[in-house]
Image (tube, coloured by chain):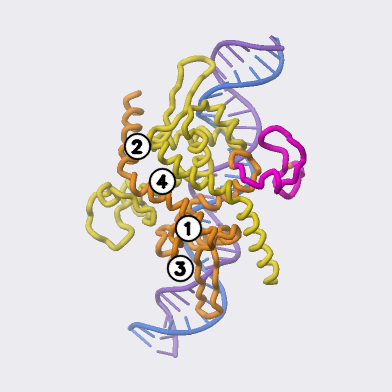
Chain colours: A orange, B yellow, C purple, D blue
DNA sequence: CAACGATACTTACCTTTAGTAAGTACGTAC
DNA sequence: GTACGTACTTACTAAAGGTAAGTATCGTTG
């Protein structure tokens, strides 16, 4: 791979403007442009377990094992990994008590609560509209089958 | 693997209630329970390119190549694949004109527009809050470095 | 009093998914 | 007539995700 720069290169999106600094060009994120750091944030937030973690932590503090039990099907590896990425973005707060056996509590920062509100929007919408979605899926499958 | 059933098994979530039918138990989706079909819908909608496709198509009709150009960095393979999954869920409508070279238009169904509104929520939030997020990331990294 | 399970992780391994590059069939522009 | 655009699909490879087991220490149970 061509050595571009350790940060995501500046050459991108809508024509080559000038070499304004990276942070300046993307002060407001632009999700449609490749290499904009907002893409990574979107990836973290909308990751398979990211959404569920944010919703689960919305308004409460939970231990690692509480989250594991609440979010059915998540592996410890992915739970730890996703919590770490959300913590790096400043959405999740981690408080570890120096006791044994370990006791770690997770909660949301102010920024995290805001993000959680947004993702709760899709989460609730999907849960509510699930009957219609199932019906729509059925209709599409039916139509496909009809078109031989 | 134990042969359970071709559909996602019924044994799950909050204690074994009874063997009420699959569709009945999950009429309203439950994203926290493994095996609930709403998980798949969430996966499609919040997939890396799913979010961007929904936002891009919100309110307009675009051709395959329009989407490819708009959503920078998406490969043709993933664009096609994600459009197909969104079409299967009934969110995206595909209209193909029988001409050569091919001409295919994509737009959103009513259900798709609703979904797009929700994902646009996070998308806009991320773009707006990107400066604060970057700052938060910096602070976390700093604190981590300080803790040796 | 010695296994057993719970705590919050990490690591090695394997499978699934995503990304890259090229091919397809045909038409238009240069 | 060579190159490019259209909307894909297919093979290959790289990265991500899932599974299972290990870690150190304590409380419960038999």
* Chain assignment, label 1: A
Task: Label 1, secondary structure: give it.
Answer: helix
* Chain assignment, label 4: B
Q: Residue at x 31, y 40 (%)?
A: A132
Which residue bears the numbered disc 4? Answer: B40
B24 w.r.t. B98: above or below: below
- Choose between B35 and B6: the one closer to the eye: B35
Which residue bears the numbered disc 3? Answer: A62
Dominant SS of magenta comes to loop
10 Å crowding of disc 4: few (<14), some (14-19), many (20+): some
Q: Residue at x 47, y 35 (%)?
A: B58
Where does the C terminus of chain B fall, quadrant-wise?
bottom right
**Separation of marks 4 and 3 at Cα, in angstroms:** 25 Å
- Choose between B82 and A52: the one closer to the eye: A52
The mark found on residue A54 in the picture is 1
User: Disc 4 or disc 3, which is closer to the eye?
Assistant: 3
**Separation of marks 2 and 3 at Cα, in angstroms:** 36 Å
Q: Residue at x 42, y 29 (%)?
A: B93
Task: Label 2, secondary structure: give it.
Answer: helix
The span shown in magenta is A2-30
A111 relative to B43 in the view: left or right = right
């Amino acid at each position: 791979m061509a050595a571009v720069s350790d940060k995501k290169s500046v050459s991108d999106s809508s024509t080559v403007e000038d070499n304004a600094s990276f942070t300046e060009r993307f002060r407001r994120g632009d999700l449609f442009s490749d290499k904009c750091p907002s893409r990574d944030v979107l990836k973290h937030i909308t990751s398979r377990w990211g959404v569920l973690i944010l919703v689960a932590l919305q308004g409460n503090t939970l231990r690692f094992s509480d989250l594991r039990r609440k979010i059915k099907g998540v592996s410890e590896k992915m739970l730890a990994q996703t919590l770490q990425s959300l913590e790096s973005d400043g959405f999740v707060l981690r408080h570890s008590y120096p006791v044994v056996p370990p006791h770690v509590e997770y909660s949301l920062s102010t920024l995290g609560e805001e993000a959680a509100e947004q993702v709760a929007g899709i989460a609730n919408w999907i849960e509510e509209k699930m009957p219609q979605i199932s019906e729509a899926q059925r209709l599409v499958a039916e139509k496909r089958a009809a078109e031989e």
